[in-house]
Amino acid sequence: MCGIVGYIGKNQARPILLEGLRRLEYRGYDSAGVAVLDGDTINNFKVKGRVAELEKILANQDLEGSIGIAHTRWATHGEPSQKNAHPHSDGEGNVFVVHNGIIENYKTLKTNLEKEGHKFSSDTDTEVIAHLVSKFLKSGDDLEQAVRKSLRLIKGAYALLVMAKSEPETLIAARFSSPLRIGVGADQLIIASDPSAILNYTSQLVTLGDGEIAVIKGTDYAISSLVGGGTIDKEIEEIEWDLTEAEKGGYDHFMLKEIMEQPETVRNTLRGRLISEEGKAVLGGLSRVEDKLRQIERITVVACGTASYAALIGEYMLEEYAGIPTEVCVSSEFRYRKAVIDPKKEAVLVLSQSGETADTLAVIKEVKEKGVLTIGIANVTGSSIAKETDAGIYNHAGPEIGVASTKVFVSQLTVLSLLTLFLGRQRQMSVTMGKRITEELLKIPEYISTILKTNQSILEIAEKYKDYNDFFFLGRKYNFPIALEGALKLKEISYIHAEGGSSGELKHGPIAMIDENFPTVFVCPKDSVYEKNISNIEEVKARKGKIIAVATEGDEEIKKIADEVFYIPKTLEMLTPILAVVPLQLLAYHVATLKDCDVDKPRNLAKSVTVE
Ligand code: F6R
């Protein structure tokens, strides 16, 4: 996700801001910028690309001053470009803002501001904040009041820093749903979205809470609630992480950090996209093709690896709830198949975390030539797949650094649920069903948190099973692809042989492998195929195979036949995969780390597969 650094103190801001940006590079970004107040001017420099590029430009510039803000941007609204990079200003060189998060209602705010004569120079949601603050300053408010009033109008998530030439001693920080910390040094304060940008200078940190605002002047800061006012006394925490630990949020690996942040990932993917009262999904990226989508009678979903397993789950969702015949094919096969697609009635949906996967890109080019509507689900804004498809939905999952996909898989399933709701409500899905899906989707982050709390017991099970050489992963219907994903996660990071498949296929061959040395992970929540799964578990048990089950909370019966059980909360059948994958990610993670494998960079694998 984006990164924020701010400085106010007795030293030059520039080196500290740039060092902070370098420390935030690990998070992934597409552009960078810095603004520093020098006398009666705020100098603002932005680049598309690396922090090193920004430094090159600054080499020949005066950037004196001891108050400033800086940012690394990971595009959400508007492609990666210099004009979309932060800091954003009010267009009059007075107010400058850096922001992490998403302003859900920015379009309405922007339209209203434009009517009042404000001129915008970027495609971002952030720029509205600078204009709002500027408007309130002009009406006589001081900077604190202007920011407070602006934030009252904003819906969404934010961590932000605001500075204004008209109030040169002040920096305002505010947060809602996106982290922000103040590093308290002897003669300076460093404010950042991530401790790694602060810890070089001080280990004394204050964390802003949701709905809190900090007014920072010199080396003093006062924190209060955005709604109620009234100063809040905050304890200063001593953070003793080294810088590498800080980048990983205190976790040992990016993969574990990314697994642990999945509740937030789902929240970010859902943000602003559900209308609960109407049981509907709003997908802005599809608005241009909404009518075309209404006519679609068939969808082909194309993707690679983990994304293709998400696609398989999407197939079940789209058929059952939107009534659209759906087929999934891996990109490397599809591109060489003579697939028969009717451009008048069919669409191709592609899924890709990186948005750069060569085989998937080739499919898009091929079907576009035939006039087929292409829809993309991508995590990286402005990526080739996002650009090449006719319309799309971003994951908003933030950068995924661990090579093995975890949080983006969960986000892909969330997007597919939203798409099912969107297309289903265009068709026969009732309001009642729409509301039911909406309600359950909103509970998913909490459910994932519940599963993550069982991490210790998953570690204990991993210790028991780490020395087996072979594993089966089996499941049915919605959770058949979770069996494939569970096996892929284990093999790619621990190098243990693992096969995933459908429980129903067991008797057609794989059961020959079962003995006491070949454990099976069964994904068997209480769903419409539960009894069938139980019969398969019995078959494995009868051949002395060890069983690890992923089951629904409250299922006591399963304990009688399974050797180990990972419980997940009860939810709608179509959403169970989003929960069932979490213990399997943790199992793979713990087995691999216990075997001393490099989980973030498994051998032979690349994060982005840009060659065939
Ligand atoms: C496995 C994994 C890969 C990717 C696949 C597609 O953990 O990450 O299987 O899912 O290479 O990549 P994207 O989604 O970038 O197209």
Image (spheres, helix red, strand yellow):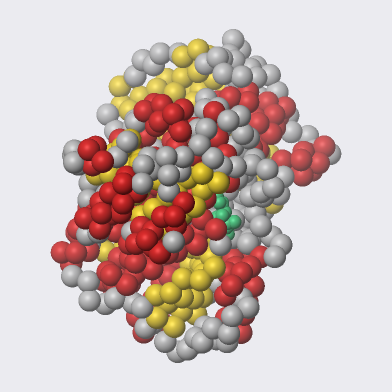
Q: Quadrant of the N terminus?
A: top right
Q: Is residue 74 left or right of residue 107?
A: right
- The answer to whether 566 appears left or right of 378 in the picture is left
The residue depicted at 39 percent of the width and 75 percent of the height is 326
- Residue 534 sits above or below residue 282 on the image: above
Percent of width and height locating residue 571: 24, 50
- The residue lying toward the viewer, choosing from 52 and 558, is 558
Residue 402 visible here? no
Could you say where residue 363 lies in the image, as x and y percent from the top left?
Answer: 60, 74
Farthest top residue in view:
186
- Of residue 550 and residue 253, the one placed in the foreground of this image is 550
- The image quarter containing residue 39 is top right
Residue 243 shows in this picture: yes
Is 368 drawn above or below residue 85 in the view shown?
Answer: below
Give me the residue at 46% from left, 14% from top: 237
Give coordinates of residue 588: x percent, y percent: 49, 39
